[in-house]
Structure formats: structure tokens, C-alpha cells
Image (tube, grey):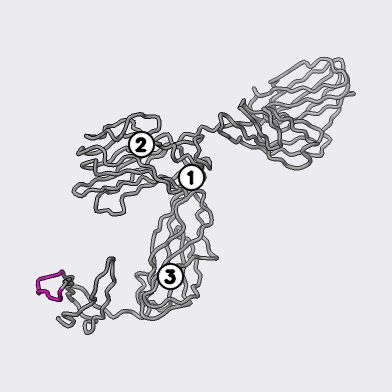
């Protein structure tokens, strides 16, 4: 309508972006409005210069309009639990606002709200972290978080809620080898580059060569003129490794290109194409340059820059694989009990060195009940092999004050541990001319027998029942005259 024709919005020069504002007097409530933008250096222009936006509606700016802008936290991660939520909002209305509610909702469940007690002036933004309410992300998988403002009298509720903010809990452990198929565009017009992430959880806490990167694979990139591409690997700690920059000449596409430290194939010699195969990273130190003790758990990023215009493409798929050279010791015991007077022998496979949770430093540890003391004790072993350490599974050993002694004739007999992993200890005080042992299943079928013979004063003997399936058995001892029967659990 020409109501606000030919108004100067800004005069000067700047090296960056500039926000120019102008009050459009006289067009409030009008429809089919056209706004034309003209840039000039000498204040002279014709009616044909610049560009225009037309068919827009002009409405009065609301007094109350609070806009939810973004959710900054939580982010994807390992072993997420009760997580804090952080949001940013913007006061688009003309009035300063305060004392309003903000909230969030996880996976469509009950909304959680808190009150923002500060003031936000017209045009200002603010960031708020919820201090009382937490987002329950304890279940592994993808969660959806809606965040919202709840300003009383808000005149435009369409911008009050930001729906379906995705946060993934990767749990306690992920595979050592993973593939991501992002389908992301690669172009010189994407100034920030193209980034795809693979999340690893449950790895050893230190990337030191015992845990090492076996390979990074470009499964598939579709792109014309490969020499336009600079490809990097970025660790969760932010360390950057150059995989390939400006290689491949004018060739198109890349597939099954495997970067490893063991390859001697120089990627920089690929001046005409990059064929499928194994290559060393362009960084001469390779993945080993990252073995500085940093935590490998978190997001590993493949970062690609297209540094020349005219060609574009897509990151279709890539993979990353770790190798863990750490030893994996095993203790063949589950939770069990012994009496204060008992001794339990535990052992693991052969390694360079050992350190048990009880302080023992040999392959086999003799655990004395009276040394450990009454109560529960967690038993595990840390071993070293070729400079790499590993920690075994653990079990709980309970030391009881039980007498644990039964009589057979003039013999005092102890059988432990019970439950057992298959190895039991028979401890006998006294003498007898003959003693036999039989193990029966609950159907009365004999599954093990052994002649122990004569006992003079004392006998301590390990009985190997590893050949029996887990379950409940009856252990019978007889001296030819009397018998003693005990229930035995193998687990």
C-alpha cells in the first residue's frame, strides 16, 4: 500500500551480521503486504533493485509472548539415570515477564514444572536448569522430551512447546564394533561441515594401547571429485586425527576404505582414485596418537569438510571397531558361605601377576574365615598380562559364626562351602578304620562315590564334583556302622 515506503533502517558498515529493526507504522492488521529490501552504497537506487517478500500479514506485536527456543540438556550418553534438564526461552512480547512456570515431559508421562523467579525483558533470552525435577532416562533406549513455557495470559501458545527432543541412553555397554548409516549431505555450502557420531559405552576407562582402535571404515560415501573431501576422526575428548585430505583426484565415490595402523598403504598416494582396501591414516602417527589415556567412552565423530564448490554428495555409512587386549580373568565361584573355622581356596587362570581383593598376590588365594572376619566379603582378582590389566567377575563370600561340625561315630565332620561351585572341602577330625563317600541325586541315583579309607587323627580333602549339573544332591558318609547324610547344593 506504500504506507511505509522508502524508510532507512540502518546506515553504516559492519564485519558481521547486524539486526536492523523498524516499526512499521500504519500497516498493523493489513494483509497482502509487500516488504522490499534494498542495499546501496550511495543512497541511490531504482524501483527495480533489491528483493521483496510479499503476501505477508502484519499484526500488532503481543504484550505477552514467551517462546521456548531450545533444550540444551540432557544429551545422549552412557548409563543415563535421573538427568537435569536445561532450556532456553525468549521473551517476544512487549512486557517484561517474571514468576512464570516452565516444564518438561518425558515419553509422554506426567509433566514436571518449576517456577522461574527472575525477570525477562522484551527481546531478551534466558536459560534455566531445573533444580528439583529430574528427567528419568534410566531405561536404555531413545527417550522423547517435550519442554514448554506456561506464562499466564500468553497470547501465542503455538510457540510455547518444543516437542520430541530426542535423547538416547546407550546403557552400560555397546559392541566393540559399530556401524552408523546417517545418510547426511556433504557439500561446500555446509560451512560447518558434516558430522556423524557413533557412541561407545562400557569400554575400559583409558585408551592406552591395551584398548586400541582396530579400524575406521568408510563403508560408503557418494560424492563427485573425491579430492574435495577432508575427512577426520574426532574423539570424545575432542582430539582430532586426520584420516584423508584432498586425496582421490577427480574420481567419484568411496566404499570399503579401511583405515588401520597396521597398513603400509599410503592414502596420500591415491591421486587418481581411492579404491576399496586398507590404508594408513594420513596422520603418520595413526590411531596410536590418541593412546594418551583419554576416556574412549562417548561420541566418536566422523567429520567431513567439502572444501571446493561445484560437487556434492552424501555420507551413507561408516564403521568403527575397537580391540580390547586386556586379560579377562574368571573366578569359578558364585555367592557362597563358609564358617569362621573354614578355609576356601579360589584361583584363576595363569597371568603375569595377580592382586586379589583380599591382598593375596598369587594365582590361588587361601581365604581363611577367621582372617576375613564375620560378615560379607566381595572376592575378585585384578591381573596383569603384557602390561595390560583386567578385573575378574566377583562373588560374595559370607563368613558365618556357625559351628558347622557334625558327628559320625567318633568323627567330627565339616563339609564346605555349601552351596558350592563343584569343589567341596571335607574336613574330618578323629580316627576310623574305613570311610566312604557317596553322592546321590534326589531320585536316589548314585552320581559319585569315593573310598576315603582309613582316617588317622585328621583328614582334609578336596572333592571335585564339577562333573555334576547344578542342583540339589545328598552327600552320604559311612564308616561301615553309621551314616551321615547332608544336603549339598551345586550352583
Q: Is residue 54 visible?
A: no
- Residue 441 locus on image (x, y percent): 69, 25
Q: Report x, y in % for residue 475.
A: 75, 25
Instruction: Indicate whether 467 appears above or below 177.
Output: above
Quadrant position of residue 41: bottom left
Identify the image quadrant of the C terminus.
top right
Q: Main SS type for the magenta part?
A: loop
Q: Which residues are magenta?
A: 42-50
Q: Which mark is residue 345?
A: none
State the residue in front, 18 or 436.
Answer: 18
- Decide which of tag 3 and tag 2 comes sooner along the chain: 3
Does dot 1 land on a helix, a strand or a loop?
loop
Q: Secondary structure at mark 2?
A: loop
Apparent side of residue 107 relative to residue 399 in the rendered image (left or right): left
Residue 355 showing in the rendered view: yes
Magenta-drawn stretch contains 46: yes
Kindly state the secondary structure of the residue where label 3 is placed: strand
Magenta-span inclusion, residue 335? no
Cβ–Cβ below 8 Å for labels 3 and 1?
no
Front disc: 2 or 1: 2
Distance between the alpha carbons at the discs numbered 2 and 1: 22 Å
Residue sitting at x 17%, y 83%: 3
Q: Tell me which residue sits at (28%, 70%) in the image.
A: 18
Q: Dot 1 surroundings within 10 Å: few (below 14), some, or many (20 or more)? A: many
Mark 3 or mark 2, which is nearer to you?
Answer: 2
Circle 3: is it few (<14), some (14-19), or many (20+) Cα within 10 Å?
Answer: some
Q: Which residue is mark 1?
A: 297
Amino acid at each position: 500500500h506504500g504506507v511505509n515506503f522508502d524508510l532507512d533502517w540502518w546506515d553504516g558498515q559492519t564485519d558481521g551480521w547486524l539486526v536492523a529493526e523498524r516499526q512499521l507504522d500504519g500497516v498493523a492488521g493489513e494483509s497482502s503486504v509487500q516488504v522490499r529490501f534494498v542495499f546501496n552504497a550511495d543512497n541511490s537506487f531504482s524501483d527495480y533493485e533489491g528483493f521483496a517478500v510479499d503476501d505477508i500479514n502484519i499484526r500488532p506485536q503481543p504484550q505477552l509472548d514467551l517462546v521456548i527456543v531450545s533444550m540444551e540438556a540432557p544429551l545422549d550418553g552412557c548409563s543415563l539415570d535421573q538427568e537435569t534438564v536445561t532450556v532456553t526461552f525468549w521473551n517476544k512480547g512487549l512486557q517484561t515477564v517474571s514468576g512464570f512456570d516452565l516444564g518438561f515431559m518425558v515419553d509422554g508421562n506426567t509433566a514436571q514444572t518449576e517456577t522461574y523467579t527472575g525477570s525477562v525483558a522484551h527481546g531478551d533470552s534466558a536459560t534455566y536448569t531445573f533444580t528439583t525435577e529430574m528427567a528419568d532416562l534410566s531405561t536404555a533406549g531413545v527417550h522423547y522430551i517435550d519442554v514448554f513455557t506456561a506464562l499466564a495470559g500468553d497470547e501465542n501458545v503455538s510457540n510455547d512447546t518444543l516437542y520430541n527432543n530426542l535423547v538416547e541412553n546407550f546403557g552400560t555397554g555397546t559392541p566393540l564394533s559399530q556401524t552408523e548409516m546417517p545418510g547426511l549431505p556433504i557439500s561446500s555450502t555446509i560451512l560447518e561441515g558434516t558430522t556423524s557420531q557413533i557412541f561407545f559405552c562400557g569400554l575400559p576407562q583409558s585408551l592406552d594401547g591395551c584398548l586400541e582402535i582396530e579400524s575406521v571404515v568408510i563403508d560408503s560415501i557418494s560424492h563427485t571429485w573425491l579430492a574435495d573431501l577432508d575427512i577426520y576422526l574426532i574423539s570424545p575428548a575432542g582430539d582430532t586425527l586426520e584420516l584423508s585430505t584432498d586425496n582421490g583426484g577427480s574420481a567419484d565415490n568411496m566404499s570399503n576404505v579401511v583405515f588401520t595402523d597396521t597398513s603400509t598403504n599410503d592414502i596420500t598416494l591415491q591421486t587418481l582414485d581411492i579404491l576399496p582396501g586398507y590404508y594408513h591414516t594420513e596422520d603418520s602417527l595413526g590411531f596410536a596418537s590418541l593412546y594418551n589415556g583419554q576416556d574412549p567412552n562417548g561420541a566418536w565423530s566422523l567429520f567431513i569438510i567439502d572444501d571446493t564448490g561445484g560437487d556434492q554428495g552424501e555420507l551413507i555409512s561408516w564403521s568403527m571397531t575397537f580391540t580390547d587386549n586386556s586379560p579377562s580373568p574368571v573366578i569359578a565361584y558364585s555367592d557362597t558361605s563358609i564358617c569362621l573355622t573354614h578355609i576356601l581356596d579360589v584361583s584363576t587362570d595363569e597371568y603375569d601377576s595377580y592382586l586379589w581383593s583380599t591382598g593375596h598376590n598369587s594365582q590361588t588365594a587361601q581365604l581363611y574365615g577367621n582372617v576375613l572376619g564375620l560378615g560379607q566379603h566381595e572376592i575378585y582378582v585384578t591381573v596383569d598380562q603384557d602390561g595390560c590389566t583386567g578385573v575378574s567377575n566377583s562373588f560374595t563370600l559370607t563368613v558365618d559364626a556357625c559351628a558347622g561340625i557334625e558327628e559320625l561315630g567318633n568323627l567330627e565332620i565339616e563339609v564346605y562351602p555349601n552351596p558350592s561351585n563343584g569343589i567341596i572341602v571335607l574336613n574330618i577330625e578323629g580316627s576310623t578304620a574305613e570311610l566312604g563317600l557317596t553322592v546321590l541325586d534326589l531320585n536316589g541315583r548314585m552320581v559319585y562315590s569315593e573310598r576315603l579309607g582309613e582316617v588317622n587323627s585328621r583328614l582334609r580333602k578336596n572333592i571335585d564334583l564339577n562333573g555334576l549339573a547344578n542342583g540339589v544332591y545328598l552327600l552320604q558318609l559311612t564308616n561301615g556302622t553309621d551314616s551321615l547324610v547332608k544336603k549339598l547344593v551345586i550352583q
